[in-house]
Amino acid sequence: TVQAPAAPQRYSFVVASNRLPVDRVIDPDGTARWANSPGGLVTALEPVMRANNGAWVGWAGQPDLQLDPFESDGISIVPVPLTADDIRMYYEGFSNDTLWPLYHDVISHPQYHREWWDSYVQVNRRFADAVAEVSEQGAVVWVQDYQLQLVPRMLREDRPDLTIGFFNHIPFPPYGIYSQLPWRTQIIEGLLGADVIGFQRLADANNFTRAVRRLKGFPTKGATIEVPLIDESVGVRAHGPIPEGKPFRTVIARHFPISIDADSFEEMARRPEIIERARQIREELGNPERIILGVDRLDYTKGIAHRLKAFGELLRDGSMTAGEVTLVQVASPSRERVEAYRQLRDEIELMVGRINGDYGTIGHAPVSYHHTSYPRDEMVALYLAADVMLVTALRDGMNLVAKEYVATRTDDDGVLILSEFAGASDELKRALLVNPHDIDGLKHAILRALHMPRAERRTRMRSLRRRVFEHDVAAWSSAFLAVLTGNGHAESLQA
Ligand code: GDG
């Protein structure tokens, strides 16, 4: 006898993101298991998931893996499979080589390929189907990020009963740039399927509403967009008569700056073994007077070359010497199969080699460069060891590294240099704000940070810490979900 497949379990709160918050790890004895990857998003959403019968829909990180839903550390996981071709065209192609550079002000040239777009549509459809299948009647769905921008509309068409939220973790570009995209209208229509569309900065939300006006002509008032109920292009079919006086649904597009689990960073920063490790790091570097730190995925948006240029020139000018100051740069491997990232790696490593070759001594390399991904403990020890944290992004949705550095500084010490092109600069106003394109300005800020008196460091760091602890990632998710359940027709979620 053939057994009918079990009916899928259904959930009242469903999060969808390209990547699941779990990693498949192989133990030494060869058995595979799942480990939760401890990102801020999971930490923030875990309590909401538990209180509301929640599930997470996404890709498990490996090609061609057909998996049934499972539980990992109390989180219900619904895997969506991707083939090797999907990964090449939807993920590495359209997401990371079209949308990523386009949304970051075309720092690198976006590639436009029609077969990548077709794959993006197909995979978004697969995600929408998976979400629809596991969402119970009237559920709240929260779709994450630029890989899944078509999912809100697809879901609204199939499941008008759902309340749908979307959050964009990266910038939304000005219309003059956005309008390059051959599929610009379809993406706007995809997003407008949501009840609430969240962005990092006010400027991102404004760029989006402007694109809506230009491409769809829908009226907008502040954060509110009026989407006509007779317009099927945004996934709305009027069921029954259209209410007189309100022939539209309202979509809210506004900013909800994301944050970190500040308490967990602070807790780690107080552990004696991590404090000891910070001391060791300084010693291993040869006890320089000052340590400057950069921590980034190796990405062209992060402005790593700009910071190396400024640092190299300061050594050349004699403003500091290799023995006095060390720049520790962690560049964690990222998107290594995308050509622009391979070129970037060569460019950065050439610069590091030049600086160390020109200004290093036998005992001191001015740049301590690490193309690797460290465990979280080591990252916190590095933050503690750093007198100056250098964040020089050319464009960045938020930049969590800046907030993590601040959260670990329980000693109210350390100086944050922060690019005004990172979303975090809207909040972290007492950092030394810089324009990373202005190399002289950047050099000036580095010198100012290196020589800043203790009293000024303390006042600035206290103010930064207040902001990060008051607006942590839990505050971010509850703010978003409150607006979402207020605008959709769902009951409010349990906190
Ligand atoms: C996107 C947006 C937005 C990095 N290297 C290691 C490591 N990391 C961790 C950091 C931080 C995270 O990765 C990076 O977050 P960022 O926010 O700095 O940047 P993106 O990866 O580009 O993130 C960004 C974010 O989404 C959230 O919305 O802020 O603007 O681009 O947490 O600590 N962690 C460990 N080892 C490493 O080597 N353990």
Image (cartoon, grey):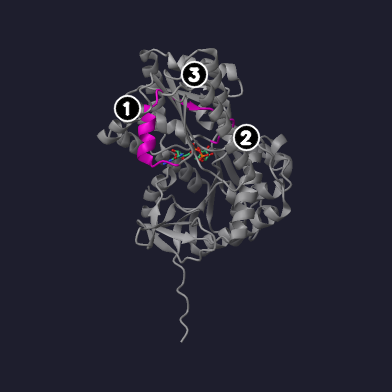
Q: Nearer the viewer, mark 3 or mark 1?
A: 3
Give the residue at mark 1.
Answer: 410
Residue under the image location 54 percent in, 27 percent down: 392
Check if mark 1's residue and mark 2's residue have beta carbons within 8 Å: no
Looking at the rendering, the stretch of residues picked out in magenta corresponds to 373-397
Three-letter amino acid code at the position of disc 3: Ile
In the figure, is residue 215 to the left or right of 47? right
Cβ of mark 2 under 8 A from ligand 1: no
| Spatial CA span between label 1 and label 2 | 36 Å
Vertical placement of 472 versus 119: above or below?
A: above
Check residue 446 in the rendering and tell me which mark sits there, or answer none: 3
User: Does label 3 or label 1 sit earlier along the sequence?
Assistant: 1
Q: Is residue 382 magenta?
A: yes
Q: Which residue is denoted by mark 2 in the rendering?
A: 206
The mark closer to the camera, 2 or 3, is 3
As rendered, which of 286 and 300 lies closer to the eye? 286
Question: What percent of the width, then of the height, locates residue 57?
Answer: 49, 57
Q: Which mark is residue 211?
A: none
**Label 3 close to label 1 by CB (< 8 Å):** no
Q: Nearer the viewer, residue 368 or 334?
A: 368
Badge 1, how many Cα within 10 Å: few under 14, some, many 20+?
some
Whichever of callouts 2 and 3 sits on the residue coming sooner in the sequence is 2
Q: Nearer the viewer, residue 379 or 195?
A: 379
In the picture, residue 466 is in which quadrant? top left
